Image (cartoon, rainbow, N blue to C red):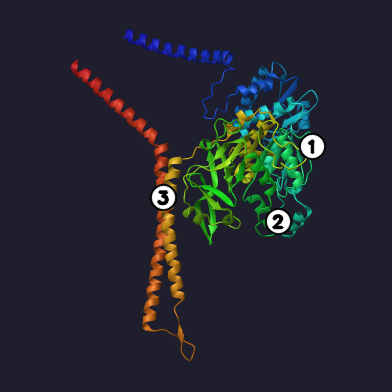
Amino acid sequence: MLQRLDSARLAILAVFVAAILFVAVNLLANIWFSQWRADFTESASYTTSAQLRPIFENIKEPITVRLYYTDAVGRVSPRHAQYYARVRDLLQQYSKLAKGMIKLELYSPEPFSDVEDRAVGFGMQGLPLNQQGEVGYFGLAATNSTDDEQVIPFFSVDRERFLEYDLTKLIYNLARPSQPKIGLITALQMDGMASMSQEQLQQMQAAGGEPPQPWAIMQQIREFFAIQNLAPDITHIPADIDMLLLIQPEGLTPQAQLAIDQYVMNGGKALLFIDPNAESQSAIANLTQREKRKPGNVSGIKKLMAAWGVRLAEGKVVGDVDSAIRVNMAMNGRPILSDYVAWMRLEADHFDPNDAVTGDLKQINVATAGALEVVADAGTTVTPLMMTGPRSMRMDADKFVSMPDIVSLFRDFQPQNKREIIAARIVGKAKSAFPDATDTVKEAKQPINVIVVADTDLLMDRFWVEVNQAMGQTVMSPTSDNGNFVSNALENLTGTPALSSLRGHGVQSHPFTLLDDIRRDAEMQYRAKEQGLTSHLEELEKKASAMQVKQDGSGAAVLSEQDKRTIETYRADILATRRELREVQRALRENIDRLQGSITFANTAGVPIVFGLILIAVAVVRHRRRKRRATDV
């Protein structure tokens, strides 16, 4: 009995000692290892890239970062408390990397205090905490030695996964003395009303349309670069332009073509977006003229492209059945859910992993893109940066001028077993597109460096970003890497790569690829059967309508018995065909839903079930072993 009591006391003492050791180890770990981090996320979302260290180590002038946080915010929303701890820890890490050139100041604004007045003066947005009017703050204001300011009015949880990128960008902008200047030539209304002519504005107002908003990509570019708009009839490129950004440059005059040509021949860099079917132009045309806009004249830039070493496949839009984006639309008054083969979601295996522009990207959405072809004997090397998969096909661009028939495009799709180039980098000793011009450079003084992209729609908001309003500020949440691709290309061509290693961290896509492949193949078979039934139905209806109806003297219809039997046969066949068509459509939905449910169950519940069965098997084996040992004794 005494031995049993001693054992119980020892067990209680052991538990007590273990609890003390657990607390002690945690306290010591917080002290000794507070700056250590382990990142097990798939995209390394919490890892500071080695490429970023020069941003902090090369800061020449002190930067003061003021972090404002009200404790009451964390009491109301524990998630914000965790978010604040992450922001604070990351800024402390940056301060250490900068060796004191970043001074972090922490403030807790109290109502009617000087700290609150200073926070409001910097533009901090107060979060209402209760009905008594109490507000809390969670924002940041940073300044450099020349009183430049960078402000985050309120840390929105919608952008938490982009935190390291946002903070690094803020420090980068304050530490850099000036922004590289980009010369922009475009026919698209990327700056909203500011880029529309007076005539277009008047037509839009007369049609009752909403004024277009500036594209999010323009805001992102302006965060790191100064933009100077250039006219399509420009005669020379200003000397302070660091690179050219050409986006659907329509109507280039011969003088402008020569100016761009000589700029590149003399070592200037260029990023070109050209599109066989710019959907943004059609959208503006709908607002102003209520009709689809025909493609503009881009022959001028095509002449320069040929000299650089690529051409745009004439009158063709490229599609990829494996990368097709699934869309929901209405046709003939009924909803249609189908893969739109001309809208593609390209993933990592479609990009060049060895190029700094595309190496870290995960996903890019493109729409009615063109195909680039290599021009022989141009003296340059063309390296694809973005390609379709092998099950791709070129389609006539005319099919997309008006509302396309998405189901027919999917049903009639015939893969050509060839990967098409959507974006490419061109490097080499190109020759001038104007060999007969006087007083000009005939061959590039150094290897040219030009990137050409056969799509402009990837720049539109709908294909890469969600723009929302929160706490009085515009919050952009990227859903794909379209914007990152543009920023990476601009930084690479201007020689200022800094943040490309961080941009892709927040964009994650984990689709059921096996499910998509099986569903797509099954749907193609059903769509073919559906088309056959639809054609048969149309033929029967035509035959029934073509029956000649005779009239008697009073005008009443007179049908022979044979005609009546024929019409009844047609009607019965029509009804049967319609029933079969509805059955095919219903079976398609049921099969897809059943398949999706099975695969989803296998992915989510399969592992726990298998693990549970393993545990049960282990328990049974152990039980039998104990029983066997007991029997032996």
Task: Check whether the beta carbons of the residues at disc 2 and disc 3 lie within 8 A of each other.
Answer: no
Task: Check whether the beta carbons of the residues at disc 3 and disc 1 lie within 8 A of each other.
Answer: no
Label of residue 534 in the image: none
Looking at the picture, which amino acid does disc 3 mark?
A: Ala
Task: Check whether the beta carbons of the residues at disc 1 and disc 2 lie within 8 A of each other.
Answer: no
Badge 3 density bin: few <14, some 14–19, many ≥20, Cα 10 Å: some
Residue at the far right in the pictured view: 146
Residue at the far bottom in the pictured view: 553
Task: Single out the mark in the foreground, 3 or 1.
Answer: 1
Looking at the picture, which amino acid does disc 1 mark?
A: Pro
| Image x and y of residue 469, in percent | 67, 42
Q: Work out whether mark 1 precedes mark 2 in sequence or the reverse, and give the earlier one.
A: 2
Read off the residue under disc 1: 238
Q: Is residue 469 visible?
A: no
The span from disc 3 to disc 1 (Cα, nearest Å) is: 57 Å
Badge 2 density bin: few <14, some 14–19, many ≥20, Cα 10 Å: some
Question: On screen, 577 above or below 107?
Answer: below
Location of the N terminus by quadrant is top left
Q: Is residue 361 visible?
A: yes
Q: Where, by quadrant of the figure, is residue 615 drawn?
A: top left
Q: Work out whether mark 3 precedes mark 1 in sequence or the reverse, and give the earlier one.
A: 1
The span from disc 2 to disc 3 (Cα, nearest Å) is: 41 Å
| Image x and y of residue 76, in percent | 62, 32
The span from disc 1 to disc 2 (Cα, nearest Å) is: 37 Å
Read off the residue under disc 2: 209
Read off the residue under disc 3: 522
